Amino acid sequence: MTPEACSACGARSVINLTLQAAEIAQANDAFRAAIINGGHPVYQGRVVCTQGVAAEGPEFITMAQLQVAGFANFTEDNDPHGDHSMASVQVCGKTVWWKIDLYDAEYNAGADDPLDDEGTRRVLTLLFPSEY
């Protein structure tokens, strides 16, 4: 548990990090599932890819997005924090990592309160392990 301030009222309280991670995981899952349908109405963000992934072409990127959108095989090894923010998929025999970072609404810094849907933006990055 960690002391924090409530994003709604500013009151100091103690945050249960396990529960916070579970709520972030739920939002990340919904965001990922919606990347193939034009985005989620509540969990806003964007999908980007590295130069290496982009060089594989639009069909490869679409296949990667489909794999990421449907990914559900989270384990303690690939999701140690329980927030469903990173894993890998196989696309055309290549390992593609994906990760979700949480930013403020202007994409200038990390999200002050990752549970504040209006003030948090997600950036899902597709990358090859060699590009990390």
Image: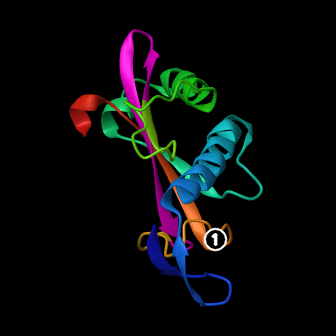
Q: Residue 60 placed where, x, y %? A: 49, 21
Is 97 colored magenta in this rendering? yes
Residue type at the position of mark 1: Asp
Position of residue 30 in the picture relative to residue 120 (left or right): right
Residue ID at (73%, 50%): 40
Q: In which quadrant is the N terminus drawn? A: bottom left
**Residue sitting at x 69%, y 44%:** 30
Helix, strand or loop for the magenta stretch, by majority: strand
Q: Is residue 82 above or below residue 70?
A: below
Please indicate whether residue 32 sits to the left or right of residue 47 in the image.
Answer: right
Q: How many marks?
A: 1
Q: Is residue 52 left or right of residue 89?
A: left
Q: Decide whether residue 67 is among the magenta residues.
A: no
Q: Which residues are magenta?
A: 88-106
Please tell me whether residue 97 is drawn above or below residue 123 in the rendered image. Answer: above
Kind of element beneath mark 1: loop
- Tag 1 residue: 116
Q: What residue is at 77 percent from the left and 55 percent from the top?
A: 41
Residue drawn at point x = 58 percent, y = 47 percent: 25
Q: Quadrant of residue 59?
A: top right
Q: Position of residue 53 (x, y in %)?
A: 38, 31
